[in-house]
Amino acid sequence: MYNEIKEVTREEADRIINNRNPLGLFWCIDNSKYIGIDNTTGDAWVEEFNTLDDCIKWLKNEENALSSDKVLNNDLIIKANIFKDIIRAEKDQVEPTIQSLLKFKEAYYELLKTWYENDILDQTESLKIYPFHISFDELNVAEWVDSTVEEIQKAYKDIKKEEC
């Protein structure tokens, strides 16, 4: 049904990936890499290749079944595009979100310090609802905040570059 493989621009490829439309097989060049897009089912499977020949073979389903690395790579590309779309649509919320995360991290450290300095929290009935000794020992809130802030800032910076 989809015998034709169509070359598209990077901008058209982004629209196909984000909108899952039109259906079909597509490829484009991006930073000296060939990007294949199999959108025959509306799932916009994406793969990156070093040669056009490998890209076309993949689009024609002439290579072996997708490896788990390729599926993972495809999922990451799709998630990154969705995340950028959200950041793009909610630009005015980027800085307040980052500031809230940093305040949360600061409050986390303050609460952790307080918890270590006294036994008050250990003696509350609500400890059954939220067991501090488990969460503080097993969760790395600071690392999560730092990673999240970094991810948001990178996506925002990438969007700014794309807009220039």
Image (cartoon, helix red, strand yellow):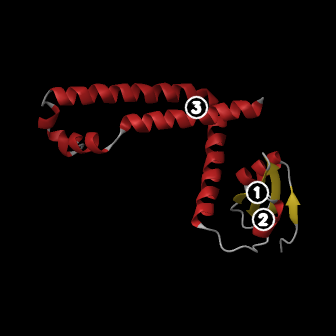
Cα distance in 3D space between marks 1 and 2: 7 Å
Q: Please give the residue where the numbered disc 2 appears in the rendered image.
A: 54
Give percent across and percent down for residue 123.
Answer: 11, 36
Give percent across and percent down for residue 154.
Answer: 60, 34
Instruction: Using the image, determine if residue 17 lies above or below residue 151.
Output: below
Quadrant of res 89: top right
Instruction: Identify the residue at image location x=77%, y=49%.
Output: 15
Between discs 1 and 3, the one toward the N terminus: 1
Quadrant of res 40: bottom right
Q: At label 3, which amino acid type do we have?
A: Gln
Q: What element carries label 3?
A: helix
Residue in front for this viewpoint, 22 or 151: 151
Cα distance in 3D space between marks 3 and 2: 34 Å
Residue in front for this viewpoint, 59 or 54: 54
Q: Please give the residue where the numbered disc 3 appears in the rendered image.
A: 153
Residue in front for this viewpoint, 150 or 89: 150
Give the farthest residue toward the front: 50
Instruction: Identify the residue at image location x=59%, y=62%.
Output: 69
Give percent across and percent down for residue 120.
Answer: 13, 30
